[in-house]
């Protein structure tokens, strides 16, 4: 993730859904947007720009210092939600200087502004139909305001704000596959049903591949690093719903997620069952642009880039993963790396499926990478964060020790 600056504090008037765009340098006085929805569990999404990137009636604009233009949704209130998502046209150009932040209404009060990351950890996967930002965890909120700052005054095409409330989705009543018997060396893994996956949303069946040659470690940057154990399933479910409904993925982007309490969670369907010599020798993920073939992705739930306020609270100078998180990551990697008979401290060759976005490597470019690598080893990104990345050499040794 790129470290993004905080926006200046600018008092912007709230607007209605049908209010026209305010001219730069002028104020707009109106009432707050009241979100209505046919589904009582889900607030209605808001369209923020048209197909040409021009602000719709949900945005107002004002010229800030150094001629930077700021756009605001105004205060949006209505049904409850636990995450918000931003998405836009996949082919849309995005101003490299564009930043975003939000403030949440909860328990009768507006909270402080928080930076929103505008780059997905996994880039724009080949299977995605739209580009966008990570699901931003808001916990139990009933109002939001989002504002953008752009040096060039430009916004992505068909920019949308989505309200995600998987805690009240149909997941509990959805059919879930039966858990498989524990495999040799398998740590405790929470299955998709444990975080409430609505299996009717994902593509049916399994997206298989012949083999696995490397593991790629990520971080999610989805809200903050101080989430509670009880909030973990809701955060994971928010990632799932956002990627499928807003971004057009076929399923969860990562194969596994590890939380700060040491919990291991199945992400993409089939990830637990996949092993060589079976009907599911590998599962194709959506976690690393151009390098989803022959890899599996493990995402650490949190933000491990120093002094980064994207995704919520500022991480400070030393956002290290907890010991419980690292131990579980090592257990998980030892299980899967051992299944595929890979050398945890060795290297392997990965072939790029094509450049573009966060992937600078053209199609068929061969990279020599560690068997246990990270997202930044194959794409241009800060993921999995500096503090997690510097722990990878020791992590490889821990995996080797576990394999004996």
Image: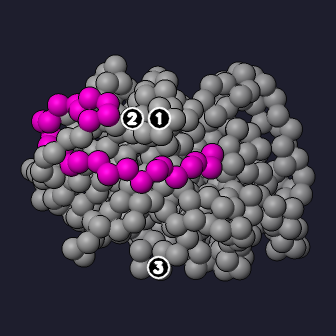
Would you say residue 182 is visible in this rendering?
yes
Q: Residue at x 55, y 70 (%)?
A: 225
Q: Gap between marks 3 and 1, in whole Å?
A: 37 Å
Would you say residue 247 is visible in this rendering?
no
Please tell me whether mark 3 or mark 1 is closer to you in this view: 1
| Residue receiving disc 3 | 228
Give the residues in magenta: 2-26
Q: What is the x, y in percent for residue 336?
A: 70, 60
Look at the numbered disc 2 and give the secondary structure of its residue: strand
| Residue receiving disc 1 | 68
Look at the numbered disc 1 and give the secondary structure of its residue: loop
Label 2 neighbour load within 10 Å: few <14, some 14-19, many 20+? some
Look at the numbered disc 3 and give the secondary structure of its residue: loop
For marks 3 and 1 on the same chain, the one whose residue lies earlier in the sequence: 1
Query: Image quarter for residue 231?
Result: bottom left
**Frontmost residue, 52 versus 265:** 52
């Amino acid at each position: 993730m790129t470290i993004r600056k905080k926006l200046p504090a600018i008092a912007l008037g709230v607007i209605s859904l049908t209010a026209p765009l305010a001219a730069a340098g002028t104020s707009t006085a109106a009432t707050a947007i009241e979100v209505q929805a046919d589904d009582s569990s889900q607030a209605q999404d808001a369209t923020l720009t048209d197909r040409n990137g021009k602000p719709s009636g949900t945005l107002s604009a004002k010229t800030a210092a150094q001629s930077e233009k700021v756009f605001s949704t105004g205060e949006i209130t209505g049904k409850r939600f636990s995450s918000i998502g931003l998405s836009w046209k996949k082919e849309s150009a995005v101003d490299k200087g564009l930043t975003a932040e939000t403030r949440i209404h909860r328990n009768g009060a507006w909270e402080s502004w928080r930076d929103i990351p505008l780059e997905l950890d996994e880039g724009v996967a080949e299977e995605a139909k739209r580009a966008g930002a990570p699901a931003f965890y808001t916990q139990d909120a009933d109002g939001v305001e989002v504002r953008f700052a752009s040096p060039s005054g430009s916004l992505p095409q068909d920019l949308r704000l989505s309200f995600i409330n998987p805690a009240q989705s149909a997941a509990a009543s959805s059919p879930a596959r039966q858990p498989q018997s524990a495999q040799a060396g398998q740590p405790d893994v929470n299955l998709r049903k444990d975080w409430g996956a609505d299996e009717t949303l994902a593509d049916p069946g399994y997206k298989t591949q012949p083999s696995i040659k490397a593991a790629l470690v990520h971080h999610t940057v989805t809200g903050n690093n101080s989430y509670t154990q009880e909030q973990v399933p809701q955060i994971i479910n928010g990632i799932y719903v956002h990627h499928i409904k807003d971004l057009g993925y076929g399923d969860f982007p990562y194969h596994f997620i590890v939380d700060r309490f040491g919990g291991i969670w199945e992400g993409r369907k089939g990830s637990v069952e996949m092993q060589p010599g079976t009907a599911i020798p590998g599962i194709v993920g959506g976690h690393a642009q151009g390098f989803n073939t022959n890899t599996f992705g493990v995402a650490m739930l949190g933000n491990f880039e120093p002094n980064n306020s994207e995704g919520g609270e500022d991480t400070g100078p030393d956002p290290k993963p907890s010991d419980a998180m690292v131990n579980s990551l090592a257990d998980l990697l030892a299980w899967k790396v051992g299944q595929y008979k890979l050398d945890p401290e060795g290297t392997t060759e990965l072939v790029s499926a094509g450049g573009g976005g966060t992937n600078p490597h053209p199609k068929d470019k061969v990279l020599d990478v560690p068997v246990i690598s990270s997202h930044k080893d194959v794409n241009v990104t800060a993921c999995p964060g500096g503090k997690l990345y510097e722990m990878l050499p020791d992590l490889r040794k821990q995996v080797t020790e576990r394999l004996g």
